[in-house]
Image (spheres, rainbow, N blue to C red):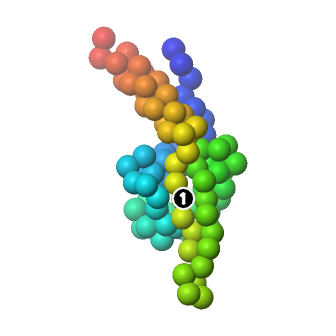
Amino acid sequence: MRELNPLLHSQLRLGVMSILMNVEEADFVYLKEKTESTAGNLSVQLDKLSAAGYISVKKGFVGKKTRTTARITEKGRNAFVEYVDALKQYISMQYK
């Protein structure tokens, strides 16, 4: 039985990855709203996912306001698929 990826086995990081699997990119405000997280917690979790190479984070400006966007990397996409596959194995064991 495969071990669940501890980096993805966090509610907020899993939520961020789930969102990014379905969009080309998402900005910080959108992720904050969809995950119902605080700005500080989301920022920390994005840093962890970025450090692992699972997402890329781009910071820029729109006028005078900062804008942070995130997108999933190929490594992140693969890690997410592996996590879901491992989770399916655990779930299927429950019903045998």
Q: Can residue 12 be seen?
A: no
Q: Which residue lies furthest to the top in this view?
A: 96
**Is the residue 69 above or below the residue 64 in the image?**
above
Q: In which quarter of the image is the C terminus?
A: top left
Front position in the image: 94 or 26: 26
Any part of residue 95 in sight:
yes
Residue 80 image offset from top left, x and y in percent: 49, 36
- Mark 1, residue position: 70
Residue at the outermost bottom position: 64
The residue drawn where x is 56% and y is 74% is 67
Q: In this view, does 89 lie to the left or right of 65?
A: left
Counting from the top left corner in percent of width and height, residue 82 is at: 49, 28
- Report which quarter residue 43 is drawn in: bottom right
**Going by the image, does 48 lie left or right of 42?**
right
Tell me which residue sits at (43%, 25%) in the image. Answer: 85
Q: Tell how many labels.
A: 1
Q: Give residue 32's position: percent from left, percent from top.
A: 48, 66
Quarter assignment of residue 75: top right
Query: At label 1, which amino acid type do we have?
Result: Ala
Looking at the image, which residue sits at the far right? 51
Tell me what residue is drawn at x 54 percent, y 28 percent. 4
Q: Which of 33 and 28 is in front in this view?
A: 28
In the displayed structure, 93 sits above or below 25; it is above
Q: Is residue 96 left or right of residue 40?
A: left
- Secondary structure found at label 1: strand
